[in-house]
Image (cartoon, rainbow, N blue to C red):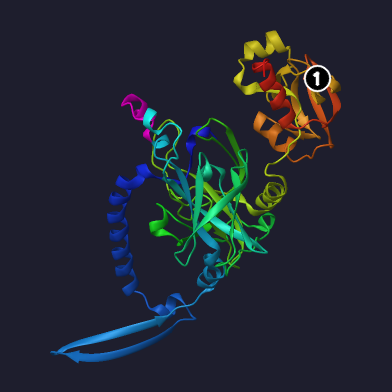
Amino acid sequence: MSRKDVTPYKKNSSFKSFVISLTGGLLGGMLMLGGFYTFGSPSDTNPNSNTTTTSSNLGGAEISNVKVNATSDITSAVEKVQGAVVSVINLQSEQSLDNGLGDFFGGSESTTGQDQTLVPASEGSGVIYKKEGNSAYVVTNNHVVEGQKGLQVLLKDGSTVEAELIGTDVFTDLAVLKISAENIDTVATFGDSDSLKVGEPAIAIGSPLGSEYANSVTQGIISSLNRPVQSTNEAGDLISINAIQTDAAINPGNSGGALVNIAGQVIGINSSKIASSAGSGVSVEGMGFAIPSNDVVTIIKQLEAQGEVIRPALGVTMIDLSSISVQQQREILNLPESVTSGVVIRSVAGATPAEKAGLQQYDVVTKIDGEEISSSQDLRALLYQKKLGDSMEITFYRGDSEQTVTVELTVDQSILQQEEQQQLEPNQ
């Protein structure tokens, strides 16, 4: 799936004109839905509903008031978790939102060295998942809090509290915030995303188009599981998710909100959707993606503990074999014709696990721990399942010879990044 296909969905200030146009559509849709509802019997659609009918006569016109007390598995699930779903407001300085126009008009000098007024730059959603002492913890998307100079959380009761950023992970697009637990009554419970079934109900709760529509609920199903979804954030960093696909409506501002099962458990954190197909520009509906809850739990534990996710590194740069022409595969790599997919090692850094294991430039990796891979995304996904100190078996081709080595994952990414920075800036 192309990275350009996927749109991370937080709501920013540029959506205001879109909100106006969409509102008419929403109102029209609600009127139409109301029309359809009047043709159906409430007892037919919901066996647990209680209907009370009263009649009165006003000026010769018969008026019938029908009151329906509708309860269902969906409403019960929403009631369990809705209080734990919040709006996350990303605050930035007014100057930073000028897109450089302040410099052009000579406005930057007057504000240099002065405190900048923070204003809402974008909005997303979040889920309160834990209370501990006087603090409560909120999980959201990393792209919701990107560029923040301050954060606020709008609770379900309408009150706003300041939030502290505890940690972020770009690769999985997750972040953890801490807020005061004083007004927190509801904490979400995570479900087991590994037990999900395609076709089961899925409920999305969040703030589409921002806090004006906070705690909006949409319903759909689990459309697919284990969808590899790649995108890039505004800084160009890679986001890679093995996602839950759902047709529950997800819109700008839903990012970081909850995907909930019929038991009221959070089974995913909504992250992105496909708005149009690549190349053709054809509009797409009902293709939203959420980070599975089991992956979320693994990441947020690390973010709470250390503010970041420490991942092992191989110490190589890579390119997919599929992106290299067949002629180059034969002339440079000397591969057998039977090898049609894998990952080519472009370079190997010194004193890294890859070099110590004997991997070299132009080796073509085809398996990790016996599992076939076809892309660098596959390799990263398997590598990032490992912990520092683990080992990993790599099968590769060097020319027409297939070989296997065991790599000891003794170096983490942060060390390599520090070394790269020192090489770029040797005087620091």
Magenta residues, start to end: 98-108
- Foreground pick, 384 / 106: 106
Q: Residue at x 57, y 52 (%)?
A: 269
Q: Which residue is drawn at 70% across and 41% down?
A: 309
Quarter of the image holding residue 241? top right
Image quarter (top left, top right, bottom left or bottom right) of the C terminus: top right
Outermost residue toward the top?
331
In this picture, residue 363 sits left or right of residue 60: right
Q: In this figure, what is the number of numbered marks?
A: 1
In the depicted structure, whether residue 237 falls above or below residue 192: above
Q: Position of residue 196 (x, y in %)?
A: 64, 57
In this picture, residue 34 sits left or right of residue 6: left
Q: Mark 1 points at which residue?
A: 359
Q: Where is residue 68 in the image (x, y as percent from the top left)?
A: 39, 81
Residue 15 on the magenta span: no
Residue 102 on the magenta span: yes
Label 1 packing within 10 angstroms: few (<14), some (14-19), many (20+)? many
Image quarter (top left, top right, bottom left or bottom right) of the N terminus: top right
Look at the image and tell me whether residue 375 can be seen. Answer: no
Q: Which amino acid does label 1 sit on?
A: Leu
Q: Which residue is drawn at 81% across and 35% down?
A: 369
* Local secondary structure at mark 1: loop
Q: Where is residue 35 in the image (x, y as percent from the top left)?
A: 29, 69
In the depicted structure, whether residue 275 falls above or below residue 320: below
- Foreground pick, 79 / 394: 79
In this picture, residue 252 sits left or right of residue 419: left
